[in-house]
Image (tube, rainbow, N blue to C red):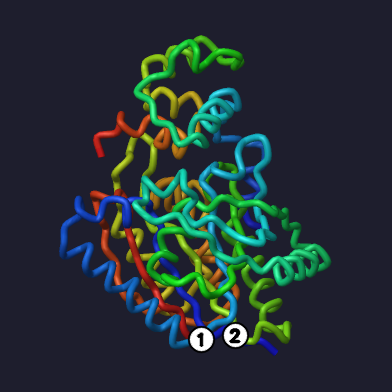
Amino acid sequence: MDHRLRDGVGASVIVISYALNKLLTAIARQHQMKERLTEEDMAGHALSDAERTALSAGDIGRLYELGANPYLIRRVFRRRFPI
Amino acid sequence: MAEIVAAALTAHAPLITGKPDVSRPEQRDRLYAGFHELRRRLAAARPDLLVMFVNDHLQNFAYDNLPAFCVGLAGSYEAPSPGGAGLMRLTPRTLRGHPEWAMALLEAGLAAGIDFAYSHDIESWDEMSVPLSFLLPEATIPVVTVYTNCAAPPLPLPRRCLEVGAFVGEFVRGRAAPPRVALIATGGLSHWVGTPETGRINPDWDHWALDHIARGDVAPLARLAWEEIERDGGNGGQEIRNWIALLGAVPGWKGEVLAYEPVAEWITGCATVWVHP
């Protein structure tokens, strides 16, 4: 038995926001880049207030904390990264 | 029976081809030389089929459906697609798949308890397009893909990747045709992509991994936990699963590191490795 596996069962450390990732995936697949998202971009998506605020601000650090996949953050908000 | 005539491990960042001008010329030239030497050796091995261990970046498999392991049954692959070509500064092109061979792999896997998902339609991103722009400049050889989830945690254990790779290796060698098969795994080494540490590279971890690969000592890599890789290799370092799968297919083979460059401007620890008996 792998002890890490046994000890890790049920102890989730990974935060995923399906709502954020669903929206960012749709934008990334259209090969679009954004500085921030507009109300129109977010229309129809079941986002929390915190998620809407982070998307509106293009706050890449906060989006990561809220469970957006970092590859999607990079794809959509590419211009927000200094490198 | 078929033979594995070539095996290689490479990086696959979009900026390798997308922004060659921003990197330090000496680093870029050494890495490109590594790719060119891999191409020379691959061509000399005269493979009839390329089996690629790669990972998606949410381009195909998103949070509505995320397979841990997926066999590509596509008849052809856009590598790159017109949409991705701009970022990677590559000409869009289509590579041939080998759906019959891939279906046989899928069926054999499921029969052996390897629970592959499968897909008939995959849009390649940098995982195929960038390394194959060097290694397969003419789209002459059909390609079969084995996709492993490296980008959307939770991820399969590296140990399981080794087992899946071992199965693929046995399957290749158990088939009569095509007779000459090359294996290529892409991704890694350390890089932080889209996280608060974006741009970080950890050459110490990269050298640790490369030293083990050079000795043919894959067990310590297969024992890695997700948390360790995330800490030392970054979220991009999770792509080492593809390398581990390939190494599982060729037990005892050793790596010859042709190039390793931590290219800050491409935010990736980039390597090209020839793997041989």
Q: How many marks?
A: 2
**Image point (30%, 59%), residue name:** B204
The residue that appears at 42% across and 36% down in the rendered structure is A75
The chain that hosts pointer 1 is: B
The N terminus of chain B, quarter of image: bottom right
Q: Is residue B219 visible?
A: yes
| Mark closest to the chain's N terminus, 2 or 1 | 1
Mark 1, Cα crowd under 10 Å, few <14 / some 14-19 / many 20+, is some
Displayed quadrant of residue B259: bottom left
Q: Which mark is residue B1?
A: none
Q: Position of residue B178 (x, y in %)?
A: 66, 82
Judge the density around disc 2: few (<14), some (14-19), many (≥20) Cα neighbours within 10 Å: many
Q: Measuring 34% from the left and 52% from the top, which residue is drawn there?
A: B89
Q: Is residue B261 left or right of residue A9?
A: left
- Quickly name the residue at label 2: B180
Q: Is residue B193 above or below residue B1?
A: above
- For this rendering, which residue is in front, B95 or B107? B95
Image quadrant where residue B42 sits: bottom left
Chain ID of residue with mark 2: B
Q: Are marks 2 and 1 in contact (CB under 8 Å)?
A: yes
Where disc 1 sits, the SS reads loop
Residue on which disc 1 sits: B46
Query: Residue A4, can we see it?
Result: no
Assign a secondary structure to mark 2.
Answer: strand
Depth check, front residue: B10 or B204: B10
> From the viewer's perspective, is residue B218 above or below residue A38?
below
Q: Is residue B68 left or right of residue A75?
A: right
Q: Amino acid at mark 1?
A: Arg
In percent of width and height, residue A46 lies at 61, 15
* x and y, in percent, of residue B124 in the image: 53, 53
Please state the horizontal and vertical placement of residue B146, each as a whole percent of the image: 62, 61
